Image (cartoon, helix red, strand yellow):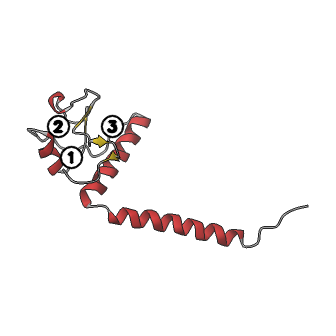
């Protein structure tokens, strides 16, 4: 006996609309520097997976400390970037000025 699902296409369309609408709403609640950081991390992760050089690397800038880097919009500075310095990388994992992860996960506030 075959079970017929009435309006399955309509329910899938509604589910996709809710998913896309929810993600779009979440995206627009982020600040500009948070959106830029998320896009940069996604591009960086893709370059790591496919082993290609990024098309638009961030330019070299000298930062005395991580607070200056974060205020300039550099949330994380990776080892393959020109602005990376080992002095800014506290745990020597190749990522300088990474966000602090406390007991509740990633911090969402601006430093």
The residue to which callout 3 is attached is 53
Foreground residue among 75 and 39: 75
Determine whether the residue tagged by mark 3 lies in a helix, strand or loop: loop
- From this viewpoint, which residue is outermost toward the right? 1
Q: What residue sits 33% from the left and 37% below the top?
A: 53
- From this viewpoint, which residue is outermost toward the left? 64
Query: Is the residue under label 2 in contact with that under label 1 (CB below 8 Å)?
Result: yes
User: What is the x, y in percent for residue 9?
Assistant: 68, 69
The residue to which callout 2 is attached is 83
* Mark 3, other Cα within 10 Å: few <14 / some 14–19 / many ≥20: few
Determine whether the residue tagged by mark 1 lies in a helix, strand or loop: loop
The residue to which callout 1 is attached is 74
Q: CA distance from mark 1 to mark 2?
A: 9 Å
* Mark 2, other Cα within 10 Å: few <14 / some 14–19 / many ≥20: some
Q: CA distance from mark 1 to mark 3?
A: 19 Å
Q: In front of the other: label 3 or label 2? A: 2
Q: In front of the other: label 1 or label 3? A: 1
Query: Which label's residue is closer to the chain start, 1 or 2?
Result: 1
Left/right placement of residue 14 relative to residue 35 reads right
Left/right placement of residue 1 relative to residue 8 reads right
Query: Is the residue under label 3 in contact with that under label 1 (CB below 8 Å)?
Result: no
User: What is the x, y in percent for residue 51?
Assistant: 40, 33
Q: What residue sits 82% from the left and 67% below the top?
A: 4
Q: In front of the other: label 1 or label 2? A: 1
Foreground residue among 110 and 20: 110
Determine whether the residue tagged by mark 2 lies in a helix, strand or loop: loop
Up-down relation of residue 75 to residue 28 (above or below): above
């Amino acid at each position: 006996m075959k079970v017929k699902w009435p309006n399955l296409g309509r329910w899938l369309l509604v589910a996709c609309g809710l998913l896309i609408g929810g993600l779009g709403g979440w995206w627009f609640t982020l600040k500009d520097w948070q959106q830029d950081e998320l896009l940069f991390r996604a591009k960086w992760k893709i370059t790591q997976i496919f082993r290609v050089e990024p098309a638009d690397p961030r330019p070299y800038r000298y930062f005395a400390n991580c607070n200056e880097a974060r205020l300039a919009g550099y949330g994380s500075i990776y080892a393959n970037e020109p602005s990376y310095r080992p002095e800014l990388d506290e745990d020597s994992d190749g990522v300088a000025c990474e966000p602090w992860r406390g007991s509740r996960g990633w911090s969402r506030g601006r430093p």
